[in-house]
Image (spheres, grey):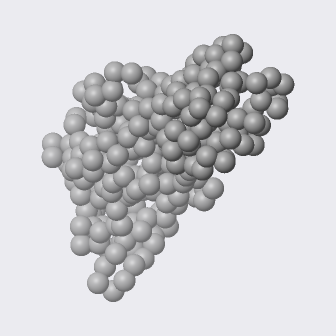
């Protein structure tokens, strides 16, 4: 028999003052309650109750054991309550990784708002191009852009952002404006390694989908590097609207191929385990999904401020 169960039966019987009363409290038979007590007494090698036909009382050893059992059961109840609380209320430390631009802007701002709501939580934000080895690096949650390559991780889509092809007015004045996606093979296209596939730009039209293999004089693993190069007349970029929207509004970049939209860029939250997801991860994901969707679907704040 399970010792903790037998201890619980013993405490209930002692409090009720009878086997029948203790059994009734636990919704078990009187015979089963008696069996648990006999099991305890056999293991302890001593009597816990003085039994007569009319009364039931604790022995001296039984009284001391009763006090200890009550404390043990209370400690277990408190421990289970604390564990359950950790599963319902965000607390402790949360380690998050995110790509450079969205991490340093949107994710950082979302974290600030989230921390105001949960004072018992600390967050460590790691800015890096990819999620890396989440388990080895102790990452609780990684923000990932684009198609997911690692199927061993569990992912949740948080938001989508439209992709825009654009370049500077000075670049177009010198090299002309592409009219169709096929025209891109004659242009310098600045490639962002952090969005896969690296040099293949997808487009949609009434005739169907197509993928154009592009090339250019600059490739980088962060979006800001090629955004700045495009502003400085080095070529065209395909980037999310929350990155280039501000530059387009200010006239620094000009969108093209708007009749050939690209599939939106998905933003995912990636985490190692599906079962027993901690409250801090679960609640932050829910908050981030609500916070992020309306913000990545439109131009972001000035990236230079």
- The residue lying toward the viewer, choosing from 228 and 242, is 242
- The residue lying toward the viewer, choosing from 2 and 155, is 2
213 over 274 or under it: above or below: below
Q: Is residue 117 visible?
A: yes
Query: In percent of the image, x 68 and y 41: which residue is there?
Result: 34
Query: In percent of the image, x 40 and y 56: which residue is there?
Result: 157
Relative placement, left or right, of 6 versus 271 is right
User: Which quadrant of the rendered structure holds the N terminus?
Assistant: top right
Q: Residue furthest bottom?
A: 207
Residue 73: image location, x then y, percent: 58, 26
Query: In percent of the image, x 25 and y 53: which residue is there?
Result: 297
Q: Residue furthest front?
A: 53
Q: Is residue 183 visible?
A: no
Residue 222: image location, x then y, percent: 46, 41
Residue 43: image location, x then y, percent: 82, 30
- The residue lying toward the viewer, choosing from 128 and 86, is 86
70 over 264 or under it: above or below: above
User: Which quadrant of the rendered structure holds the C terminus?
Assistant: top left
Query: In percent of the image, x 36 and y 52: which residue is there?
Result: 158
- The residue lying toward the viewer, choosing from 305 and 29, is 29
75 over 148 or under it: above or below: above
Residue 193: image location, x then y, percent: 51, 49
Disc tally is 0
* Image-quadrant location for residue 159: bottom left
């Amino acid at each position: 028999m399970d010792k903790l169960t037998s201890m619980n039966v013993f405490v209930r019987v002692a409090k009720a003052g009878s086997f029948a009363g203790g059994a009734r409290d636990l919704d078990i038979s009187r015979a089963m309650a008696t069996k648990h007590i006999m099991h305890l007494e056999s293991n302890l090698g001593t009597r816990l109750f003085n039994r007569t036909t009319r009364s039931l009382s604790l022995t001296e050893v039984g009284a001391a054991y009763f006090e200890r059992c009550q404390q043990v059961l209370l400690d277990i109840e408190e421990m289970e309550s604390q564990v359950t609380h950790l599963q319902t209320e965000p607390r402790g430390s949360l380690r998050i990784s995110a790509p450079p631009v969205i991490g340093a802007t949107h994710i950082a701002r979302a974290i600030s708002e989230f921390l105001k709501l949960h004072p018992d939580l600390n967050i460590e934000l790691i800015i890096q191009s990819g999620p890396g080895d989440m388990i080895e690096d102790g990452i609780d949650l990684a923000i990932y852009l684009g198609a997911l390559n690692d199927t061993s991780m569990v992912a949740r889509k948080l938001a989508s952002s439209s992709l825009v092809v654009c370049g500077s007015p000075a670049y177009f004045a010198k090299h002309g404006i592409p009219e169709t996606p096929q025209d891109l093979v004659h242009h310098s296209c600045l490639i962002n390694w952090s969005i896969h596939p690296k040099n293949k730009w997808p487009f949609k039209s009434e005739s169907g989908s197509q993928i154009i293999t592009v090339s250019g004089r600059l490739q980088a693993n962060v979006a800001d590097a090629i955004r700045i190069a495009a502003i400085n007349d080095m070529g065209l970029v395909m980037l999310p609207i929350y990155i280039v929207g501000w530059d387009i509004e200010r006239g620094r970049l000009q969108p093209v191929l708007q009749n050939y939209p690209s599939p939106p860029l998905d933003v995912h939250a990636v985490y190692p385990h599906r079962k027993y997801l901690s409250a801090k991860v679960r609640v932050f994901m829910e908050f981030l999904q609500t916070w992020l969707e309306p913000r990545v679907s439109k131009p972001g704040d000035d990236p230079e401020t």
